[in-house]
Structures are given as structure tokens and as C-alpha cells.
Amino acid sequence: MGKVESNKKQKKDALFNTAFELFTTKGTNKTTISDIADKAGVAKGTFYLYFKDKYDIRNKLVSYKTKELFYRAYQSVLEHEISGFDNQLHFMVDFILDSLEQDYALLVFISKNLSWGVFQAALDDKMPDSDQQFYQQYLELIKKDGRTYDHPDLMLFSVIELASSTCYSCILYQQPVSLTEYRPYLHRTIDAILTSFESKGL
């Protein structure tokens, strides 16, 4: 990477990191583009070289953080040599929940801002240090298991949306029950989602 490209990456990373810090402490509505640019140490005009507005950087941040969680969960599946798609998906969900339980700011940020469009962007983007997309790796896990599902992208979104939204209160407020108490029910519901998306054939 040349010096110019390196400088661009440093500025974009600074904007990314600063925006995440401000969004998770002040909130998106109370954060301005000037706040982000000033704290990142760049000119306001530089912000617009990379992002349309603060909602654009917010969406890209949610996509990036979601993709990062997916990637780490996937890597953990490989490291632990988990076999069988059902087991792999449950393992990844538990990995993601454990990560969110240790990072309340990330949990709140993702739970409040995850949408289908943002989720799709996370699936389509390349994984860190790789030319492959997480979604392609996810499809490979399904293929190796020998099963077929209708709309596997929608199936994954349903699982992630269910886990992040229902576990939000369990983690933050221990309501209606603790995450430990809720997990068995969550995993049963995930099994039901998988069954509902499984291709029935003709």
C-alpha cells in the first residue's frame, strides 16, 4: 500500500472509530458530522469523501461490526472443528451472544440499527484479510451438510435478528429472564426457523 492509500485508510479508520465512539456514548441523533470530523482530527470536507452523511457512516459501521462478529464466530467454528450445520449455527450464535454480553455498547448499537439492507451489505462484503465473503462461507457450511434451504440469506437474517432483539433485554436488564435462562428457548426457536426454511422438495 502506497503512502497516499495509507493516509486515506488512516483517515477513514479514524472517522469510523470516532463515529462508533460518539454514536455509542452520545447517540446518533445528538452526534453531528462536525463532532465526528473534529474528534477524528480531519476536515469536515474529508468526511464527505468517504460518507454521504452520518446515517451512511452509521449503516456502514453496523455492517462492518456485524461482519466482524460473523467472521470471528466462523473462525471459532473452524478452530473448534464443529461439524454439522445445525451445530455450527448454534455455536456461532452462542459465540456472538457471548461477545455482545461482554460489549454492551456494541449490543445496543447493533440491536438498534440492524436492518435488512445493512445486513445484506455485511453479507456481500469481503471478510477481513480474505477475498471471500462470509455469505459464501456460510453457504459452504450448508452445502457440506447436504441440506438445502429456501432463502438461506433470509434464514440467517431471521436467526440473527431473533438473537439480537430478544437477547437485548436479557443481557442488559436480565428481563424477562437472564440470558442463561433464555438460551435453551432461543436455540429451540432457531431449530424451528431452520425447519421452516428447509426445502421440502416436490
Image (cartoon, helix red, strand yellow):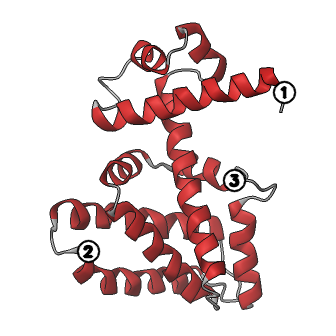
For label 2, count other residues whose C-alpha is less than 10 Å away and answer few (under 14), some (14-19) or many (20+).
many
| Residue that carries the numbered disc 3 in the rendered image | 128
| Quarter of the image that includes the C terminus | bottom right
Residue 45 appears in the rendering: yes
Amino acid type, mark 3 = Pro
Left or right, 81 with respect to 155, comes to: right
Of badges 1 and 3, nearer the viewer stands: 1
Which residue shows up at 76% across the image and 86% down it? 144
> Which badge, 1 or 3, comes first in the chain's sequence?
1
Residue 202 appears in the rendering: no
> Which badge, 1 or 2, comes first in the chain's sequence?
1
Looking at the image, do the residues carrying marks 1 and 3 touch, with CB atoms under 8 Å apart?
A: no
> Which badge, 3 or 2, comes first in the chain's sequence?
3
- Within the image, what quadrant is residue 172 found in? bottom left
Question: Element at badge 1?
Answer: loop
Amino acid type, mark 2 = Leu
Disc 3 from disc 2: Cα separation: 29 Å
Disc 1 from disc 2: Cα separation: 47 Å
Which residue shows up at 73% across the image and 52% down it? 126
Amino acid type, mark 1 = Gly
Residue 77 horizontal/vertical position (percent): 61, 79
For label 3, count other residues whose C-alpha is less than 10 Å away and answer few (under 14), some (14-19) or many (20+).
some
| Residue that carries the numbered disc 1 in the rendered image | 2
Of badges 3 and 2, nearer the viewer stands: 3
Query: Looking at the rendered structure, which numbered label has been put on residue 179?
Result: 2
* Camera-side residue of 43 and 32: 43
